[in-house]
Image (spheres, helix red, strand yellow):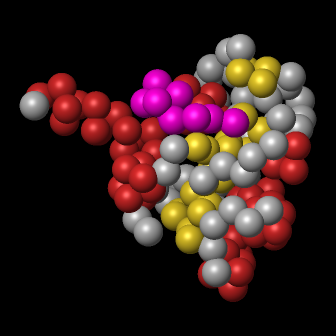
Amino acid sequence: MTAEEILDTKKSFAIIGATPNKERYGYEVFEILRAHGYQVFPINPKYPEIDGVACYPSLMALKTPPDVVLTALAPANTEQVIDSIKALGIETVWMPPGCWSENAVKRCQELGLNCIYDECPVWMLKLRSRSQARS
């Protein structure tokens, strides 16, 4: 499944590394996904909520698994969450630029996960908005 197909068909995203800091990528991706109508579950044990949305301490704390897990983490930290994503039965992992590593991609492939990496959902959604505005 491509990044475009994910944006077209998936409805819920868990963002590991979401943050209320508006200057960080973990906030930017949280904000743009919400603005485009996706259900977003911020994951970060440091915060009880982000912009009025409950923030969960871990993926395991979610009542319902999301369609996609998006990592807003350093590559080494992304590598550490891949196995737990698979264990929860989540099939799609998105690792934006700066958040992925060859080891993380390899582990996703070994586990049979659909893996998107080095593609930015923020950029893709902004581009879509511009295209729709011109139409």
| Quarter location, residue 93 | bottom right
Whether 18 is drawn above or below 4: the answer is above
Nearer the observer, 34 or 126: 34
Count the marks.
0
View extreme (top): residue: 52
Q: Position of residue 78 (x, y in %)?
A: 74, 59
Which range of residues does the magenta coloring cover?
A: 32-41
Q: Is residue 28 visible?
A: no
Q: Is residue 90 magenta?
A: no
Q: Which residue is drawn at 86% across and 22% down?
A: 48
Q: Residue at x 72, y 34 (%)?
A: 42
Q: In which quarter of the image is the N terminus?
A: bottom left
View extreme (left): residue: 135
Q: Position of residue 117 (x, y in %)?
A: 53, 63
User: Is 102 situated left or right of 77 in this image?
Assistant: left
Whether 96 is drawn above or below 11: the answer is below
Whether 62 is drawn above or below 22: the answer is below
Q: Quadrant of the C terminus?
A: top left
View extreme (front): residue: 64
Q: Position of residue 51 (x, y in %)?
A: 68, 15
Whether 40 is drawn above or below 13: the answer is above
Q: Is residue 39 magenta?
A: yes
Q: Which residue is drawn at 62% across and 35% down?
A: 40
Q: Position of residue 122 (x, y in %)?
A: 45, 39
Nearer the observer, 35 or 9: 9
Q: Can residue 41 be seen in this view?
A: yes
Q: Which residue is drawn at 69% across and 36% down?
A: 41
| Quarter location, residue 23 | top right
